[in-house]
Image: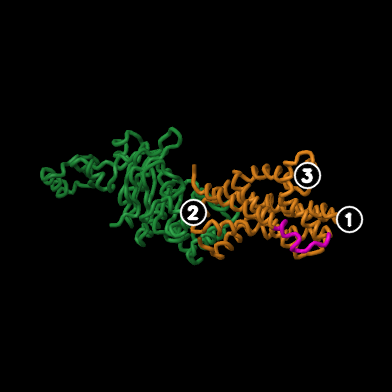
Amino acid sequence: MENIIEVTSLQKAFGSSRALKDVTFSVKRGEIFGFLGPSGSGKTTTIKILTAQLRPTSGSAYAFGVSTEQLNSEKYRQKVGIITDNTALYGRLNVYDNLKLYCDLYGVPYQRIAEVLQMVNLAGEEKKPVSKLSKGMLQRVILARAFLHEPELLFLDEPTSALDPVNTKHIHEGLLLLKEKGTTIFLTTHDMNEAEALCDRVAFLNDGEIRLLDSPKKLRQQRGEPTLTVELADGSMVIVPKGPEGADQMFRYMSSNQLVSVQSNHPTLGDIFVEVTGRKLA
Amino acid sequence: MTFSTRRIFAILQKDYKDLSRNLFVSTTLIMPLLMAVLFGRMGIEGIASHYLIINLGFILVGAYVQSSLIAEEKEKNTLRGLMLSPASTLEIFCGKSLLSFIATAVVVAGSIWLSGYNPRNLAVIAIALVLSAVFYVGLGTLIGLFTKSVMEASVVIVPVMFIFSSGSFLTPFIDKYPVLAVVEYMPNLQLLELANRVEAGAGLGDVLLHLLVILAWVLVIHAVAAYVYKKRMVDE
């Protein structure tokens, strides 16, 4: 599959502080790529470099085959959607007028407004002034704005950090729908459940360096124990080996109707992050 | 570079709705008109007095309202959204300047009418006023790009008002300090000089140099504003 983003030996320094030390990765067209790391690890800096809002100190970053420094042209901006920590709306305008402006800027028909509001669970809120919206609703309108033109490449910096579980689920469904339509999504998050639910591959970023990069499933399998935790009818939990030696034991539990649940003993992405970096995601 | 009227009018429409709900800035539009009514009732005479009100309109509406519109976009982080959209720098500049330009034109025309100023050659004066309005809107854009908030823009506009007010305070010192002769090329003084000559019977050909000087200011201020805007697109 074609790479839509290619980053090689990317470095960024702010004075004596090195935000990115030597970052190399690529993102394939059509995938959801998760960039995971705690606050200050360099996630937003990377997004800003990839969206031409910041110049790298050294190294290269390419999107659509061109250097990201050239992404400021109108041609490429039409293909990209961006939500970062400083994305904002016009407070004195209502939801509809905010989205209408961006329909005009991106050449999108106004009918799309109802569709994107549906995607973020805000159908019927068009006339509400933005200044009256809660933080979560505001975040959803910002997401709706990014979904308007169905970008080829969507950068999302902590998109669901202000949302409750119900609305997070709506946003995740919307993102998966965009992915189905071919949008590549570059997502930064420190929510490991979000990364597991959405991402095809994840990179662990810590102190400006990528420590690990693979699919969530592979990362968990590589570090999993070859055992299962079995919950029995009497409430006890039993560890059973995964190999042939555990098969008889499992058969016994099942034939005697004792089996309640079975869980594979894989670490969570959060556990792996702590193991690799020695830091918790927060 | 693209030029889409849909994008330009979308930004204009957005600014209009936004400004109409912003009492702090929109009440500024009334100030020059109130001054014009006051001066009109007092029966003011002399070109310099008329241009005092006209320049007030240029500074308060052209420069100040424009700087507030830009500074607020920066303060609220919405300017970055426009910068990251497919709209070109030219489209954003035109869209962001159009409302201030229209408001300036309406306010200056209203001030002229209310103060009872009847130029001897309306066409020449109209050309000079339009060029001046474009200059002051460009000046406002530049102030907006340099300031971080509407409050800061409100402070910065005070010395600008002082410098660009009609009959610059520096002109009396030109005889003593010849270096200050450069002040005579300021757009407000060029406009005043042009108006005086038109009143004395000069035609378009006679005041062409004044128009060219104002045009040069227009080009320089917009070129500088475009350069600063491009710099602002990338964080340091």
Pointer 1 residue? B43
* Residue located 75% across and 48% down the image: B165
Residue B99, percent across and down?
65, 58
Residue extending farthest right: B43
Tell me the residue at 33%/56% (across/down): A29
The chain whose colour is orange is B
Earlier in the chain: of badge 3 and badge 1, it is 1
B51 in the magenta segment: no
Q: Residue A164 appears at what percent x and percent y? A: 44, 48
Give the residue pinned by disc 3: B171
Q: Say if residue A74 shows up in the picture.
A: yes
The chain to which mark 3 is attached is B
Question: Dot 1 surroundings within 10 Å: few (below 14), some, or many (20 or more)?
Answer: few
Q: Nearer the viewer, mark 3 or mark 1?
A: 3
Residue B84 disc label: 2
| Type of amino acid under label 1 | Gly
